Image (tube, rainbow, N blue to C red):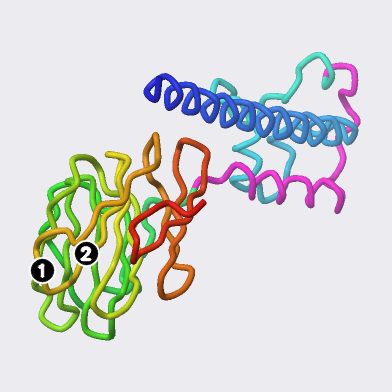
Amino acid sequence: EEANAQAEEAWGFLRRVKDKVKGNKKHDTHFLKAAHRDLLKSGETVSDRPNSSSAANHSLSPRKTPGTPLFRAETKRQKGQHGTISHVHRDILSQTQMRLTPQSDDTDYQDLIEPIKSFKGHTSPVTQIAAIDQNCFISSSWDTTVRMWSAVTGECIRTFRGHRDWVHAISVLDNKHFISGSDDRTIKLWNVDQDECVHTFNGHSSFVKALAPMDGDRFLSGSRDRTIKLFSLTSGECLQ
């Protein structure tokens, strides 16, 4: 049932993306046709344009060659009426160039900022990170673990194992404790000085995707089961 729900949600997302792409294509096609109509009103062909730019070449079909009319039937009726490109036409061509000119493959990446340090240890994609203090942080991953790292040395200080499925959510409670939420439908409380889980919270019927502390004793959790639950750290019970 959960797999079907995920598949349905994914298909819905793909349909929305596809519809949006179609809408953009329709808008661009309408824009180009309008540009061509304005050019034809001047009775102009590609060869008649002074200082022909890449924008003019982009407006042609790949099978057309420079010097041929954009629309033969129209230019035949307007033969002998060639004129210069008006300011309006130049604006249209410049906008068309902005829409159609692909980004250069020679992009200069020299100015990209290099990372100070890379932290390697997870064997699957990292889902979330959270800072414990200025020198230490934790990370969760699809490899079902949470790792604690030294921001100074770049080394993994401790690996927290206990979840049986992907870990999607982590939240720091104080400089000694944090909680983690997993696709195994559980939330676990951890002490940064211990490898083993301090307590496991149950209550969700689907994947746990979000966690947020409320105060010193309570925290919130969000799940794919479409519920938000309030838990007590001291009693370990779901309050609401």
Q: Is residue 226 above or below residue 80?
A: below
Across and down, in percent, residue 121 comes to 10, 59
Q: Is residue 186 above or below residue 40?
A: below
Q: Answer few, some or many: residues within 10 Å of disc 1's Cα (few below 14, many 20 plus, some between 14 and 19).
A: few
Instruction: Check disc 1 and report its element: helix, strand or loop.
Output: loop
Across and down, in percent, residue 34 comes to 82, 33
> Relative to 81, is 215 on the left or the right?
left
> Relative to 96, is 217 on the left or the right?
left
The residue lying at 11 percent from left, 60 percent from top is 196
The residue lying at 66 percent from left, 40 percent from top is 56
Residue in the foreground of this view, choosing between 54 and 6 = 6
Residue in the foreground of this view, choosing between 20 and 223 = 223
Q: Which residue is mark 1?
A: 194
Which amino acid type corresponds to the residue marked 2 in the rendered image? Trp
Across and down, in percent, residue 171 comes to 35, 65
Work out how far the residue at label 2 is from the one at label 1, CA to CA, in angstroms.
7 Å
Q: Which label was assigned to residue 21? A: none
Q: Which residue is mark 2?
A: 190
Tell me the magenta residue range: 76-102
Which amino acid type corresponds to the residue marked 1 in the rendered image? Gln
Instruction: Check disc 2 and report its element: helix, strand or loop.
Output: strand
Q: Are marks 2 and 1 in contact (CB under 8 Å)?
A: yes
The residue lying at 36 percent from left, 56 percent from top is 106
